Amino acid sequence: MARTLVNVPKKAKRGEVITIKTLISHIMETGFRHNSLGARIPRDIIDSFVCTYNGEEVFRAALHPAIAANPFITFHTVATESGTIAFKWTGDNGFSAAASAKITVE
Amino acid sequence: MSARAFRYRRPALAAIIAAIFTATAFSASGEIPLDQRRSAYADMSRDNKAMQDDDTSNPGMLWVLDGEALWGAKAGKAKRACADCHGDARASMKGVAARYPAFDATLGRPVNLEQRINLCRAQRQQASPLPYESKDILALTAFIALQSRGQPIAPPDDKRLTPFRDAGRTQYSQRQGQLNLSCQQCHDDNWGKNLAGNTVPQGHPSGYPIYRLEWQTLGSLQRRLRNCLIGMRAEIYPFGAAEYVNMELYLMWRARGMKIETPAVRP
Amino acid sequence: MGENDTTQATRRRFLAAAGGAGLMLAVRPAKATPASMTLAIRRVVGEAEVKPGKVKLDLPPLVENGNTVAISVSVDSPMTPQNYVKAIHLFSEQNPLPNIVSVRLGPRAGRASISTRIRLADTQNVTAICELSDGTFWSDSKHVIITLGACLEGMI
């Protein structure tokens, strides 16, 4: 599976807005590049990123080839309760990757 | 390669005239004074600096994490992991990248970090070598070099390295390619000036392997040197060529005392 | 105020052009143009009016390498169930494709602010559009100068 690097605070106060940073290894081939023989390299990107908080969707992004390689996305969510914040990336050629982090909300 | 160097060394009239007019004669006087050296980090935009500084957003860290996994993974017929001999890399690899390339007695020449890793794989793990610029070799090199982050570059005081370092310095100073440029002309004599909208860096190897935005991936110093040679319309050597290791040896000496920044981000 | 009038006039002109450009779209354009960006915006926004304001697009004015450009978009919103940002969209007028990213938010976001890294092929305007829970659309646009472009350059 592709390497991921997610940054979620381990602890937060209830109601606090936390910052989540995500980074995933992916070439994000645009489909506009050509190889040394002049042939177009086919598109191969992550096109969807979803974040769920204890199973409920809190963030969703539809990515296009203009997202740079090794997509980096920073967003926010309200720390509502302790549990698991999960991340799912999907894309071309059946690409799929997942990561998660635990958070303690007091 | 050596024939070419020899031709330049002979006191041909053309060479003397060229030396007088261009003032890039092969000597130590063209070198940047130690206190004026600066990493290309200083010339980057605020956003690119931020990308390098934050381990949670530095794309190079993805390879470092892969390298950490490889460090602990059993490999080869010997089913041995790097960790089995070297333990915790944080301790055992501290300062290593800062003093490479180093002399390898069995080969009788210096080797860089990539080659050292592959020597270990062959000799200790009975594993096949990792191809140059492959994801795995970049990951391991990045992980090992990270353990020297913040450490000053410390070329080893090893007399056996001298002829190779001198060969690297010769290469650095001699004109080559269709553009007939030497590394020295840009990186010693004209650093800080603009070329095609970019600031000419001094060309120090302090952050390798780097995440180069142009490549959109991590890459080694050899890859960067190849890019330069292509830019000068000079013939590029194959990966792993002694010419690259000699250059690396000289560049590390030239950058002695500067801090390791791996994994650096560069445009 | 003047900016609003110019945007309205420009928009009307582009919409008129977009109608005629419908036939031309049978052949895929080599790269986006302000007109195809407008069309892409229309596809997202429908018939609603897009007003400048509320959303703030943060981009460096000069970029060394268009392959990785740090970008931030934020909307001043209380993000309550009654008043929140539903979506943020980013568009390019000079990349091969006009869409960059679309993000869906809700009250659980807490703050309508995202950061990412994008590719920009050439010096151009980048437009951010946000959709609020009350169905209104707001935009911000920034001009970026790209030294080395993405997508259209060769590989070494």
Image (cartoon, rainbow, N blue to C red):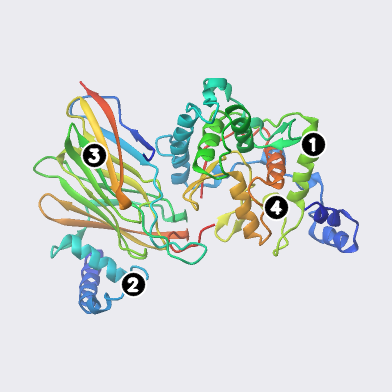
Q: Position of residue C32 (x, y in %)?
A: 33, 68
Numbered mark located on residue B91 in the image: none
Q: CA distance from mark 1 to mark 2?
A: 58 Å
- Residue where numbered disc 4 is placed: B183
What residue appears at the point 22 percent right and 42 percent down from the top-left corner? A59
Secondary element type, mark 2: loop
Would you call the spot at circle 4 few (<14 residues within 10 Å), some (14-19), or many (20 or more)? Answer: many
Q: Are marks 4 and 1 on the same chain?
A: yes
Q: Amino acid at mark 4?
A: Cys
Asked whether the residues under the numbered discs 1 and 3 touch, taking CB atoms below 8 Å apart as contact, a structural biologist would say no
Q: Chain of mark 1?
A: B
Residue C2 visible, this orientation: no
Q: Of circles 4 and 2, which is in front?
A: 2
Q: Chain of mark 3?
A: A
Secondary element type, mark 3: strand
For the residue pair B267 and A71, the one nearer the viewer reads as A71
Numbered mark located on residue B162 in the image: 1
Asked whether the residues under the numbered discs 1 and 2 touch, taking CB atoms below 8 Å apart as contact, a structural biologist would say no
Would you call the spot at circle 2 few (<14 residues within 10 Å), some (14-19), or many (20 or more)? Answer: few
A39 lies left or right of B176? left
Q: CA distance from mark 1 to mark 3?
A: 56 Å
Q: Amino acid at mark 2?
A: Pro
Asked whether the residues under the numbered discs 4 and 1 touch, taking CB atoms below 8 Å apart as contact, a structural biologist would say no
What residue appears at the point 26 percent right and 26 percent down from the top-left corner? A102
Q: Position of residue B86 (x, y in %)?
A: 56, 22
Q: Chain of mark 4?
A: B
- Residue where numbered disc 3 is placed: A51
Q: Image quarter for residue B123?
A: top right
Q: CA distance from mark 2 to mark 3?
A: 34 Å
